């Protein structure tokens, strides 16, 4: 594979989409081919799964939820991400398997190692070259969630302790793989964050 796989991770409302868009813009200016995508919902099949997993009214069993995210991921990697990387494109993706480890593993209290293994099986063990973790302290994260005008989805509607576990899990993942992760304080100004991201991506592009 000759492309570069870059993922953005973090809690809800930390600015992943803004940063993904800025990185895309910068890479296109350099003449790179870019595919910007997201999970869940980066394919037609995935959009149906996204609707099920985020907007179903009522309980979804935690293991079923984990399998739905993994199914979305399997189809997305096979039909969008790997073909793009094989063409040599940069893939910029909003959320990937670390979200499953954090939300389904730590948030839902399933076994994080099993959740990770499930996603690795689903994707034939594809890991990103760069994962940007936008980390935000709990009080600011809650304020951003509350200020969001869209109706809450099933995960956003979870209580504060759920989001605290998710945040801690992301930080632990980053500490375990410092080569892959870049942890950035999401409270920094948008352009400062973008500059830090560009430095890391430029390094990996060589
Ligand atoms: P996303 O569309 O990124 O929402 P937001 O823009 O609010 O961050 O993700 C939707 C929700 O899905 C989000 O609350 C996190 C959750 N999620 C998981 O629980 N597991 C996963 O594997 C993924 C990819 C997302």
Image (spheres, rainbow, N blue to C red):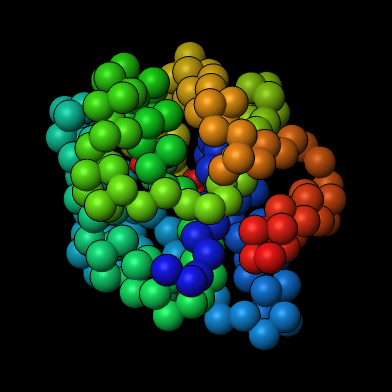
Q: Quadrant of residue 159?
A: top left
Q: Is residue 131 above or below residue 87?
A: above
Q: Which quarter shows the N terminus?
A: bottom left
Q: Is residue 8 above or below residue 114?
A: below
Given residues 130 and 156, the one toward you in this image is: 130
Q: Is residue 68 left or right of residue 160?
A: left
Q: Quadrant of residue 69?
A: top left
In the rendering, at what x and y percent does residue 34 appear? Answer: 54, 76
Q: How many marks?
A: 0
Q: Is residue 81 left or right of residue 22?
A: left
Q: Determine if residue 132 is in view.
A: yes
Q: Is residue 101 above or below residue 152?
A: above
Query: Regarding ligand 1, which quadrant of the image does it lie in?
Result: top left
Q: Residue at x 18, y 40 (%)?
A: 67
Q: Is residue 149 above or below residue 145?
A: below
Q: Quadrant of residue 64?
A: top left
Q: As drawn, which residue projects farthest toward the bottom?
A: 31
In the rendering, at what x and y percent does residue 81 appear? Answer: 37, 66
Q: Residue at x 64, y 22 (%)?
A: 138
In the rendering, at what x and y percent does residue 63 appear? Answer: 17, 29
In the rendering, at what x and y percent does residue 36 appear? Answer: 50, 69
Q: Determine if residue 50 is in view.
A: no
Given residues 25 and 125, the one toward you in this image is: 125
Q: Residue at x 72, y 72 (%)?
A: 26
Q: Is residue 17 left or right of residue 187?
A: left
Q: Is residue 195 left or right of residue 135?
A: right
Q: Residue at x 22, y 48 (%)?
A: 122
Q: Which quarter shows the C terminus?
A: bottom right
């Amino acid at each position: 594979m000759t492309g570069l796989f870059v993922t953005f991770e973090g809690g809800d409302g930390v600015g992943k989409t803004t940063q993904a868009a800025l990185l895309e813009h910068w890479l296109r200016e350099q003449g790179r081919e870019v595919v910007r995508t997201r999970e869940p919902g980066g394919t037609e099949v995935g959009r149906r799964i996204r609707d099920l997993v985020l907007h179903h009214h009522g309980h979804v069993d935690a293991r079923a939820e984990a399998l739905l995210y993994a199914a979305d991921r399997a189809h997305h990697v096979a039909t969008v991400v790997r073909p793009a990387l094989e063409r040599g494109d940069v893939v910029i993706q909003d959320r990937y398997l670390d979200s499953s480890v954090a939300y389904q593993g730590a948030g839902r209290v399933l076994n994080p190692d099993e959740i990770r293994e499930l996603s690795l099986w689903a994707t034939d063990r594809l890991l990103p070259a760069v994962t940007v973790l936008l980390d935000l302290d709990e009080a600011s994260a809650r304020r951003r969630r509350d200020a969001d005008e869209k109706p809450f989805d099933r995960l956003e509607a979870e209580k504060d302790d759920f989001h605290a576990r998710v945040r801690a899990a992301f930080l632990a993942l980053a500490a375990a793989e410092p080569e892959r992760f870049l942890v950035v304080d999401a409270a920094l100004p948008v352009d400062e964050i973008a500059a830090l991201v560009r430095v890391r991506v430029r390094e990996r592009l060589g």
